[in-house]
Amino acid sequence: MTASGTPYASEPEVRTAAGVLRGGREAGLAVFRGIPYAEPPVGALRFAAPRPVRGWDGVRPALAYGPPPPQSSLLGGPQDTAGDDWLTVNVWTPEPHPAAGLPVMVWIPGGGYVSGNAGLPEYDAGHLAASGIVVVTLNYRLGIEGFALIDGAPANRGLLDQVAALQWVRDNIRAFGGDPGRVTVFGESAGGGSVAALLAMPRAAALFRRAVAQSVPGTFFSPELAADVAAACAAELGVRPTVSGLSAVDPARLPAIGDAISAKITRWRERWGQITHRPIPFAPVVDGDVLPATPWQALADGAARDVELLVGHTRDEHRLFSLIDGVLGQVTHEQTETALRMLAPGPDGARRYREAFPAADDEELYELVNADWLFRMPSLRLADAQVAGGGRAHLYELTWPAPGLGGALGACHGLDVPLVFGNLSSGQPAMLIGDPPSPAAEELSARIRTAWTAFAAHGDPGWPPYDAERRLAQLFDTPSTVTAYPEEASRLLWRDHAFAALPLLAP
């Protein structure tokens, strides 16, 4: 049945605020793709906050994903920029009827804030929606378009896009069978960082009730650092870092400029510091307006005490990046010393790491400090901040060693994505699972999906909330267990570290 009760089982229709959409049927679900939630951010709207989409007459087909936003090629992002309708959402629903009142999950893709595409096969939400959830996935502006601090433009345009998508959900999801009062945002990596940012943003208040932050990066920029990176990008183009200067450059050209800065980012090490180690040229900016404070500060101050939080990370977060960087299994003593010197907290952080892990060799220390700085400790500390601010959090760690690629990557970054979506044999991350997926992988994926969807439905993923005394966490493995958070040595090393906005080191 459609929202209007018309029996077009193969062509479900819904009426949104902007007009009527016609989707398709897949495995008993109604699926709508490529729905615009804002006007294309080009022309006069380039580098502006997103504008509400204009309505249309008649029935608009919603069968194909919208074009991905221009993005980096470094992580294998799509380079097909045909069309500029980047700001779209996709909806999977078991029951597209306004009376259904189903929980809603809104997915924010990751990709280092420079790549990300909701149309990738790993983000197909059919398995999640089949459990009685309306699932929405979205695209947002990336790289220079979305996150560079540009004179004359609002900061954090990519985050403002996400807010606009959540406003679209609030205003329209009931027509798809969703309950706008039971919205859960979830995301991984830069998507998890986006979820953390949304928790701290006044503009996002009351747009969602629950949040799942997977592998939250600790990188949030000060305005000074962000402006300096933007100036370097503009200089690469021979223009000024202003709206008028950058608007003269075709959007399709900008990702290559970000990639060029990444490729030689170590030349700015004395100015930009830690972000030159990974490299990370773009991240949310703590500008004081769109994002008034870091998520850790905002949550500790109670900004999200009314939002239930599920947060966690994988055990071996950095191993995938070591593979990408070509250093897996061959990290040198010098590389480890550099990583410890740049990333370990406090003036004697390198010594404290070696003392805390006396049996670790150089490679293990290299993996630990990179994983702790970028994902593990920011994720843990987000749970701490939420509890300190009077809110509720549930903590997890994915410890299941992935059998794919010869088992070399362990429980690496991104392994949670195919497990959460249940897409164990489609999409790039499926290579981590192994072919064919083992019964253990199928079972673990089902358990994680059950936890995520139960949390979205009623706030309880199936294990006790996190607190500062017991620090209970769900360890996802075969079998899974609930125990005190296991990364105690790292926790103690980072206990007094404030994940502040990263500064510009030299003016």
Image (cartoon, rainbow, N blue to C red):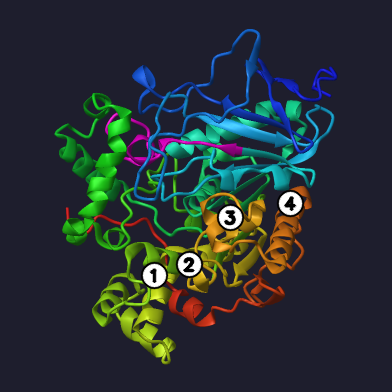
Mark pair 4, 2: CA separation? 24 Å
Mark closer to the chain start, 3 or 1? 1
- In the structure shown, which secondary structural element does the residue marked by tag 1 occupy? helix
Mark closer to the chain start, 4 or 3? 3
> At x 70% / y 65%, what residue is drawn?
444
Q: Find disc 4 in the rendering and name its residue.
A: 453
- In the structure shown, which secondary structural element does the residue marked by tag 4 occupy? helix
Does residue 439 show up magenta in the picture?
Answer: no
**Left or right relative to 244: residue 369:** right
Mark pair 3, 2: CA separation? 13 Å
Q: Find disc 3 in the rendering and name its residue.
A: 417
Residues marked 4 and 2 touching at CB (< 8 Å): no
Q: Find disc 1 in the rendering and name its residue.
A: 370
Closer to the camera, 504 or 84?
A: 84
**Left or right relative to 175: residue 396:** left
Closer to the camera, 2 or 161?
A: 2
Q: Amino acid at mark 3?
A: Val
- In the structure shown, which secondary structural element does the residue marked by tag 3 occupy? helix
Residue 226 showing in the rendered view: yes
Q: Amino acid at mark 1?
A: Asn
Residue 319 image position (x, y, % from top left):
44, 69
Q: Point out which mark residue 317 bears.
A: 2
- For the N terminus, which image quadrant? top right
Which contiguous range is marked in magenta?
Answer: 137-157
